[in-house]
Amino acid sequence: MGFCVMNSGMIRDNLLNIQSTLKEGVRLIAVSKTKPVEDLQEAYDAGQRLFGENKALEMRDKHAVLPEDIEWHFIGHLQTNKIKYIAAYVRMIHSIDSLTLLEAVEKEARKHDRVIDCLLQFHIATEETKFGLNMEEARALLESAEYAAMEHVRIVGVMGMATNTTDRELVRKEFRTLREYKEQLAEQYFKGRDDFKEISMGMSHDYDIAMEEGSTMVRVGSSIFGARNYGIPVNDEK
Ligand SMILES: *Cc1c(COP(=O)(O)O)cnc(C)c1O
Protein backbone atom coordinates (compact mmCIF):
# COMPACT_ATOMS: atom_id res chain seq x y z
CA MET A 1 0.00 0.00 0.00
CA GLY A 2 1.40 3.39 -0.97
CA PHE A 3 1.68 5.76 1.95
CA CYS A 4 1.32 9.04 0.03
CA VAL A 5 -2.02 8.14 -1.48
CA MET A 6 -5.30 9.26 0.02
CA ASN A 7 -7.11 6.02 0.73
CA SER A 8 -10.67 5.61 -0.31
CA GLY A 9 -12.92 6.78 2.52
CA MET A 10 -10.29 9.03 4.03
CA ILE A 11 -11.99 12.28 3.01
CA ARG A 12 -15.21 10.99 4.48
CA ASP A 13 -13.48 10.05 7.73
CA ASN A 14 -11.71 13.41 7.98
CA LEU A 15 -14.94 15.25 7.30
CA LEU A 16 -16.99 13.38 9.89
CA ASN A 17 -14.18 13.86 12.36
CA ILE A 18 -14.11 17.63 11.86
CA GLN A 19 -17.90 17.90 11.88
CA SER A 20 -17.90 16.26 15.30
CA THR A 21 -15.69 19.07 16.64
CA LEU A 22 -17.86 21.95 15.38
CA LYS A 23 -19.50 24.19 17.95
CA GLU A 24 -23.22 24.73 17.67
CA GLY A 25 -24.09 27.30 15.03
CA VAL A 26 -20.75 27.01 13.20
CA ARG A 27 -20.88 26.01 9.54
CA LEU A 28 -18.08 24.13 7.83
CA ILE A 29 -16.85 25.23 4.43
CA ALA A 30 -14.83 22.47 2.81
CA VAL A 31 -11.99 24.26 1.02
CA SER A 32 -11.42 22.17 -2.10
CA LYS A 33 -9.08 24.42 -4.10
CA THR A 34 -6.62 22.48 -6.31
CA LYS A 35 -8.44 19.19 -5.54
CA PRO A 36 -10.06 17.05 -8.27
CA VAL A 37 -13.84 16.78 -8.54
CA GLU A 38 -13.69 13.15 -7.37
CA ASP A 39 -12.52 14.41 -3.99
CA LEU A 40 -15.36 16.93 -3.80
CA GLN A 41 -17.81 14.21 -4.79
CA GLU A 42 -16.57 12.01 -1.95
CA ALA A 43 -17.14 14.87 0.51
CA TYR A 44 -20.56 15.50 -1.04
CA ASP A 45 -21.49 11.84 -0.66
CA ALA A 46 -20.55 12.12 3.02
CA GLY A 47 -23.09 14.94 3.34
CA GLN A 48 -20.97 18.06 2.80
CA ARG A 49 -22.76 20.83 0.85
CA LEU A 50 -20.65 23.99 1.39
CA PHE A 51 -17.48 24.18 -0.67
CA GLY A 52 -14.88 26.94 -0.87
CA GLU A 53 -12.75 27.78 -3.89
CA ASN A 54 -10.29 30.63 -4.49
CA LYS A 55 -10.06 30.69 -8.30
CA ALA A 56 -13.03 31.72 -10.43
CA LEU A 57 -12.32 29.45 -13.38
CA GLU A 58 -11.72 26.46 -11.14
CA MET A 59 -15.03 27.11 -9.40
CA ARG A 60 -16.77 27.42 -12.76
CA ASP A 61 -15.38 24.09 -13.99
CA LYS A 62 -16.29 22.26 -10.78
CA HIS A 63 -19.74 23.83 -10.60
CA ALA A 64 -20.43 22.60 -14.13
CA VAL A 65 -20.00 18.92 -13.25
CA LEU A 66 -20.99 18.61 -9.58
CA PRO A 67 -24.49 18.42 -8.01
CA GLU A 68 -26.71 21.50 -8.19
CA ASP A 69 -27.40 21.74 -4.48
CA ILE A 70 -23.80 22.58 -3.56
CA GLU A 71 -23.35 26.03 -1.98
CA TRP A 72 -20.29 27.61 -3.59
CA HIS A 73 -18.27 30.01 -1.45
CA PHE A 74 -15.60 32.15 -3.07
CA ILE A 75 -12.79 32.71 -0.58
CA GLY A 76 -9.83 34.07 -2.54
CA HIS A 77 -8.68 37.32 -4.05
CA LEU A 78 -11.20 38.07 -6.80
CA GLN A 79 -10.33 39.97 -9.95
CA THR A 80 -13.18 42.08 -11.34
CA ASN A 81 -12.89 40.52 -14.80
CA LYS A 82 -13.44 37.01 -13.34
CA ILE A 83 -16.71 37.67 -11.49
CA LYS A 84 -18.69 36.76 -14.60
CA TYR A 85 -17.63 33.12 -14.26
CA ILE A 86 -19.27 32.72 -10.85
CA ALA A 87 -22.01 35.40 -10.64
CA ALA A 88 -24.87 33.12 -11.75
CA TYR A 89 -24.54 30.67 -8.87
CA VAL A 90 -21.99 31.71 -6.21
CA ARG A 91 -23.63 31.64 -2.78
CA MET A 92 -21.24 33.94 -0.97
CA ILE A 93 -18.12 35.97 -1.74
CA HIS A 94 -15.95 36.13 1.39
CA SER A 95 -13.27 38.38 -0.01
CA ILE A 96 -14.64 41.88 -0.68
CA ASP A 97 -11.65 44.15 -0.12
CA SER A 98 -12.58 47.29 -2.06
CA LEU A 99 -15.55 49.37 -3.17
CA THR A 100 -14.43 48.80 -6.76
CA LEU A 101 -14.76 45.04 -6.35
CA LEU A 102 -18.17 45.36 -4.67
CA GLU A 103 -19.37 47.58 -7.53
CA ALA A 104 -18.23 44.98 -10.04
CA VAL A 105 -20.06 42.22 -8.14
CA GLU A 106 -23.20 44.40 -8.07
CA LYS A 107 -22.99 44.84 -11.82
CA GLU A 108 -22.63 41.11 -12.57
CA ALA A 109 -25.29 40.09 -10.03
CA ARG A 110 -27.73 42.52 -11.65
CA LYS A 111 -27.29 40.78 -14.99
CA HIS A 112 -28.54 37.57 -13.37
CA ASP A 113 -31.24 39.33 -11.33
CA ARG A 114 -29.69 37.96 -8.14
CA VAL A 115 -28.56 39.27 -4.79
CA ILE A 116 -25.12 37.95 -3.87
CA ASP A 117 -24.16 37.69 -0.21
CA CYS A 118 -20.75 39.21 0.52
CA LEU A 119 -18.34 39.49 3.43
CA LEU A 120 -15.92 42.34 4.03
CA GLN A 121 -12.42 40.89 4.25
CA PHE A 122 -10.26 42.49 6.92
CA HIS A 123 -6.52 42.52 7.22
CA ILE A 124 -5.99 41.18 10.75
CA ALA A 125 -2.64 39.38 10.39
CA THR A 126 0.72 40.90 11.21
CA GLU A 127 1.99 39.61 7.86
CA GLU A 128 2.13 42.14 5.04
CA THR A 129 1.08 39.68 2.38
CA LYS A 130 -2.58 39.14 3.20
CA PHE A 131 -5.33 41.09 1.50
CA GLY A 132 -8.00 43.00 3.33
CA LEU A 133 -9.49 46.25 4.53
CA ASN A 134 -8.83 48.19 7.70
CA MET A 135 -11.70 49.76 9.67
CA GLU A 136 -11.26 53.16 8.09
CA GLU A 137 -11.56 51.71 4.61
CA ALA A 138 -14.55 49.61 5.61
CA ARG A 139 -16.32 52.66 7.00
CA ALA A 140 -15.61 54.65 3.84
CA LEU A 141 -17.09 51.82 1.76
CA LEU A 142 -20.22 51.51 3.93
CA GLU A 143 -20.76 55.29 3.95
CA SER A 144 -20.33 55.71 0.21
CA ALA A 145 -23.15 56.80 -2.08
CA GLU A 146 -22.16 53.98 -4.44
CA TYR A 147 -22.80 51.33 -1.79
CA ALA A 148 -26.07 52.96 -0.76
CA ALA A 149 -27.34 52.58 -4.32
CA MET A 150 -26.54 48.87 -4.63
CA GLU A 151 -29.44 46.43 -4.84
CA HIS A 152 -27.76 43.18 -5.89
CA VAL A 153 -25.24 42.66 -3.10
CA ARG A 154 -25.91 42.10 0.57
CA ILE A 155 -23.12 42.45 3.12
CA VAL A 156 -23.71 39.74 5.73
CA GLY A 157 -20.54 39.87 7.80
CA VAL A 158 -16.76 39.83 7.91
CA MET A 159 -13.89 37.53 7.02
CA GLY A 160 -10.25 37.39 8.02
CA MET A 161 -7.13 35.25 8.07
CA ALA A 162 -4.86 35.15 11.09
CA THR A 163 -1.08 35.16 10.91
CA ASN A 164 0.37 31.80 9.88
CA THR A 165 2.20 31.09 13.12
CA THR A 166 2.41 28.60 15.96
CA ASP A 167 1.86 31.49 18.40
CA ARG A 168 -1.72 30.65 19.34
CA GLU A 169 -2.14 33.70 21.54
CA LEU A 170 -1.35 35.98 18.61
CA VAL A 171 -3.87 34.11 16.46
CA ARG A 172 -6.48 34.43 19.21
CA LYS A 173 -5.83 38.16 19.49
CA GLU A 174 -6.30 38.62 15.75
CA PHE A 175 -9.56 36.66 15.70
CA ARG A 176 -10.78 38.69 18.66
CA THR A 177 -9.99 41.88 16.75
CA LEU A 178 -12.07 40.66 13.81
CA ARG A 179 -15.01 39.93 16.07
CA GLU A 180 -14.73 43.41 17.57
CA TYR A 181 -14.71 44.95 14.08
CA LYS A 182 -17.85 43.00 13.26
CA GLU A 183 -19.57 44.15 16.44
CA GLN A 184 -18.65 47.79 15.81
CA LEU A 185 -19.92 47.67 12.25
CA ALA A 186 -23.13 45.93 13.31
CA GLU A 187 -23.77 48.68 15.83
CA GLN A 188 -22.92 51.52 13.49
CA TYR A 189 -24.26 50.41 10.10
CA PHE A 190 -26.55 47.41 10.50
CA LYS A 191 -28.72 48.29 13.48
CA GLY A 192 -31.96 46.35 13.57
CA ARG A 193 -30.79 43.99 10.85
CA ASP A 194 -30.16 40.41 11.78
CA ASP A 195 -28.62 39.43 8.43
CA PHE A 196 -25.25 41.01 9.30
CA LYS A 197 -24.12 38.09 11.44
CA GLU A 198 -21.34 36.08 9.83
CA ILE A 199 -17.73 35.87 11.00
CA SER A 200 -15.75 33.73 8.57
CA MET A 201 -12.54 32.81 10.36
CA GLY A 202 -10.52 29.70 11.09
CA MET A 203 -8.62 27.23 8.89
CA SER A 204 -7.27 23.72 9.45
CA HIS A 205 -4.66 24.69 12.02
CA ASP A 206 -6.58 27.38 13.90
CA TYR A 207 -10.33 26.82 13.53
CA ASP A 208 -10.59 25.60 17.13
CA ILE A 209 -9.36 29.01 18.34
CA ALA A 210 -11.60 30.78 15.82
CA MET A 211 -14.67 28.98 17.18
CA GLU A 212 -13.77 29.98 20.72
CA GLU A 213 -13.60 33.59 19.51
CA GLY A 214 -17.00 33.56 17.82
CA SER A 215 -16.53 32.23 14.30
CA THR A 216 -19.75 31.31 12.47
CA MET A 217 -18.05 29.80 9.41
CA VAL A 218 -14.77 27.89 9.40
CA ARG A 219 -12.90 27.31 6.14
CA VAL A 220 -11.09 23.98 6.35
CA GLY A 221 -9.10 22.49 3.49
CA SER A 222 -6.06 20.33 4.12
CA SER A 223 -7.48 18.62 7.22
CA ILE A 224 -10.26 17.26 4.99
CA PHE A 225 -8.64 16.72 1.61
CA GLY A 226 -4.97 16.34 2.55
CA ALA A 227 -2.06 18.61 1.72
CA ARG A 228 -2.22 20.58 -1.53
CA ASN A 229 0.31 20.26 -4.29
CA TYR A 230 0.94 23.65 -5.85
CA GLY A 231 3.57 22.22 -8.17
CA ILE A 232 0.98 21.24 -10.74
CA PRO A 233 -1.35 24.11 -11.64
CA VAL A 234 -4.92 22.80 -12.04
CA ASN A 235 -6.08 25.84 -13.94
CA ASP A 236 -4.67 28.68 -15.98
CA GLU A 237 -6.01 31.89 -14.50
CA LYS A 238 -4.19 34.21 -16.87
C1 LIG B 1 -6.73 27.65 1.42
C2 LIG B 1 -7.58 28.51 2.27
C3 LIG B 1 -8.20 28.00 3.44
C4 LIG B 1 -8.01 26.58 3.92
O1 LIG B 1 -6.72 26.38 4.38
P1 LIG B 1 -6.27 24.99 5.10
O2 LIG B 1 -5.08 25.38 5.87
O3 LIG B 1 -5.99 24.04 4.00
O4 LIG B 1 -7.41 24.57 5.96
C5 LIG B 1 -9.02 28.85 4.16
N1 LIG B 1 -9.23 30.12 3.79
C6 LIG B 1 -8.65 30.65 2.69
C7 LIG B 1 -8.92 32.07 2.35
C8 LIG B 1 -7.82 29.87 1.91
O5 LIG B 1 -7.24 30.41 0.82
Image (cartoon, rainbow, N blue to C red):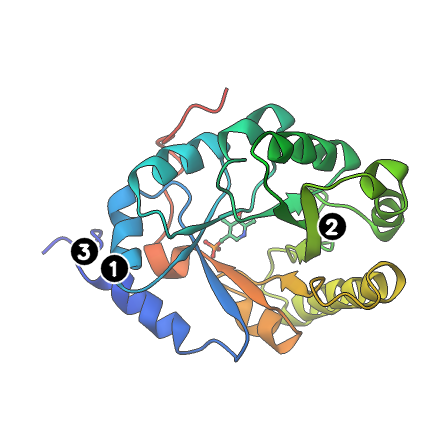
The amino acid type of the residue labelled 3 equals Phe
Mark 1 highlights which residue?
A: 45
Considering every residue shown, the one lying at the far front of the view is: 113
Residue located at (73% from left, 55% from top): 124
**In front here: 156 or 179?**
156
* Rendering coords of residue 81 (x, y %): 60, 23
Mark 1 residue crowding within 10 angstroms, few (<14) / some (14–19) / many (20+): few
Residue 102: quadrant of the picture: top right
Q: Under 8 Å from ligand 1: the CB of mark 1? A: no
Cβ atoms at labels 2 and 1 below 8 Å apart: no
Residue located at (82% from left, 49% from top): 134
Residue 159: quadrant of the picture: bottom right
Q: Is residue 215 above or below residue 224?
A: below
Tell me the SS state at disc 1.
helix
* Residue 120 visible at all: no
Considering every residue shown, the one lying at the far top of the view is: 238
Which mark sits nearer the N-terminus, 2 or 3?
A: 3
Mark 2 highlights which residue?
A: 123
**In front here: 88 or 118?**
88
Q: Which label belongs to residue 3?
A: 3
